[in-house]
Image (cartoon, helix red, strand yellow):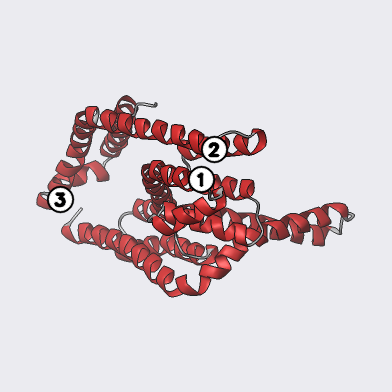
Amino acid sequence: MNGLQISAYVLVAVYMVTFFAIAVFVLGKITETQRLVSRRLDYVTDRKRQEELKKQKAKKEKSKRRGQNSDLKDSFVAKIGEAIFDELMAANIMMKPEEFAIVWILLAFGPAFLAVLLVRSNPFLPGVLAILGVAGPMIYVKKKQADRAKAFDGQLSDALLICCNCLRSGLTFSQAMENIADEMEDPIGTEFKRACNEMNYGANLDEVLNNMVDRIDSADLMLTVAAVSVQRQTGGNLSQILEVISETIRERLRIKAEIKTLTGQGRASGMIIGLMPLVVAAILMVLNPSYMSKLFETDIGRILVVISIVMEGLGFFFIFKIVNIKY
């Protein structure tokens, strides 16, 4: 492996990351303002319309084979689009499903095509880049969802205190949600604003809260929604219930911070030990490519590379299991 091939690898990797970041930013900014209202309307009305259409189709007799195949295809595409839409909404990425799909396809095939043109001596690189291009966007979306849920949990306790104060002052729970949407920042302010818009478009409170739970993967939010639903059915002092839940969430956050502090040394050690072989290998590829080329040109070298990758993965997995304490 010479310096030109290494430069080609770096060029393709930089292209993949840069193109995805620019495409997400530019497309999101261009189409954000014109889709804010329509997105909220679609979120409330489209599902109801799809359910009604499905019920109507279920009542009809079976169509011909060609028509039936067409309906199945349309239904499959609609389900994929709805799934992508839900994932983007949970990550707060202002892109249409078709826009995200276009970026996804370009990332899956673009870097691999460049690798075929630039690095013809390595037949494995295009396949690896294609796999990374397919997995990269979803990893990015999941990371955005996790970060958003974490930030939401950090704001939920304060939001519940605001809700308690509003209820004690004589406001309704819906009005308390509007105060939270106006006074608090993203992500909890944005999510409650979405919930208020859904109620303004005709959705009931239980449906609105369940939609919020679907968007935000938060155990604390599920507990809060369950408490509100039970109180609406059985009665009781909702402000007192929410105050207790707020204190519980605050204690959970404190325990999480303590556990993160205690396990920080283990995580740092695992990252340093795990990344050290990769860093050393990258340095040797730059300083002495002929020395490292034996690992890729011989059968025993390829076997050792595969074994090393498997052992690295196992090491990261076990370290993650040790330091990731469930509570």
**Pointer 2 with pointer 1, Cβ within 8 A:** yes
Q: What amino acid is labelled 1 in the image?
A: Leu
| Mark 1, other Cα within 10 Å: few <14 / some 14–19 / many ≥20 | some
**Pointer 3 with pointer 2, Cβ within 8 A:** no
Which numbered circle lies on residue 289? 3
Q: Front-most of 134 and 129?
A: 134
Residue 86 image offset from top left, x and y in percent: 55, 54
Residue 14 image offset from top left, x and y in percent: 27, 61
Q: Which residue is mark 1?
A: 167
Q: Earlier in the sequence, mark 1 or mark 3?
A: 1
Q: Quadrant of the C terminus?
A: top left
The mark closer to the camera, 1 or 3, is: 1
In terms of image quadrants, where is residue 6?
Answer: bottom left
Q: Which residue is mark 2?
A: 238
Q: Earlier in the sequence, mark 2 or mark 1?
A: 1
Relative to 8, is 20 on the left or the right? right
Relative to 67, is 150 on the left or the right? left
3D distance between C-alphas at marks 1 and 3: 69 Å
In terms of image quadrants, where is residue 322?
Answer: top left
* Circle 3 SS class: helix
* Circle 2 SS class: helix
The residue under the point 32% across, 26% down is: 318
Is 34 placed above or below 1 here? below
The residue under the point 80% across, 57% down is: 68
| Mark 3, other Cα within 10 Å: few <14 / some 14–19 / many ≥20 | some
In terms of image quadrants, where is residue 157?
Answer: top left
Q: Residue furthest right?
A: 61
Q: What amino acid is labelled 2 in the image?
A: Leu
| Residue 314 appearing in the image | no
